[in-house]
Image: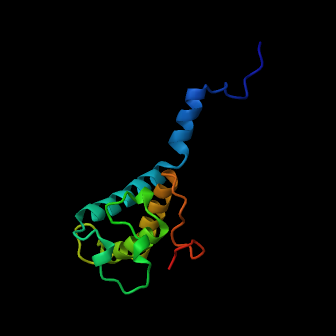
Amino acid sequence: MPPKRRFRPPKSEQEEKQILEECIPPKSTRSSTKWAFKVFSEWQVARVNKNPRIEERSFKIDIDKVQTLDTNIANMSVETLNFWLTKFVQEVPMQGQRRELSGESLYMIAAGLQRHLGESGNAIRLLNQDEEGYS
C-alpha cells in the first residue's frame, strides 16, 4: 500500500497565477481601491472648473507645476495631486448626503487612491511629508 500523501500535488503556472490574483490583494482591498478611485473620478468629471490657474486657493503653490483636473490621476505630478486632492477632500460628501465625510472615510479614500496610484505605476506617496512637493 502506497504511503498516504501528506502534500498537495504541484500547481500549474495558470493555477498559481489564479491563486495569486484571488488573494493578493484581498478582495476587500481591491473593492476599497476601486471605490476610492470611483469617488475621485466622479468628482473629477462633475467638477466645473478644472483649470488650476483660475481656482481660488488659500495655500502657496507653484501653479505652473499644477496640471488641469482633466489629467488622469495616474499621470498627475506631486504638485497636481497636492492641489486637487486638497480641493477634493473639501468638496466630497457622503453619497446621497450633504454632510462632510468622516476623517476615517477620507483616510480610506486616500489609502485607496494610494493603492490605485501604485498599481498604475505612479510611486507618489500620499499623506507623506517627506514626499517632494508635499505641503
Instruction: Determine which quarter of the picture holds residue 69.
Output: bottom left
Residue depicted at 56% across the width and 29% down the height: 15
Q: Nearer the viewer, residue 18 or 77?
A: 77
Residue 6, image x, y percentages: 73, 28
Q: How many marks?
A: 0
Residue 49, image x, y percentages: 24, 71
State the residue lying farthest toward the top: 1
Residue depicted at 34% across the width and 75% down the height: 87
Residue 22 vertical position relative to residue 109 in the rendered view, above or below: above
Way the structure is coloured: rainbow
Q: Say left or right for 90 vs 65.
A: left
Residue depicted at 59% across the width and 32% down the height: 16
Residue 30, image x, y percentages: 45, 51
Residue 42, image x, y percentages: 28, 61
Q: Say left or right for 3 vs 116.
A: right
The N terminus: image quadrant = top right
Q: Say left or right for 50 vs 107.
A: left
Residue depicted at 48% across the width and 54% down the height: 29
Q: Nearer the viewer, residue 29 or 124?
A: 124
Q: Nearer the viewer, residue 128 or 54?
A: 54
State the residue lying farthest toward the bottom: 58
Instruction: Determine which quarter of the picture holds residue 17.
Output: top right
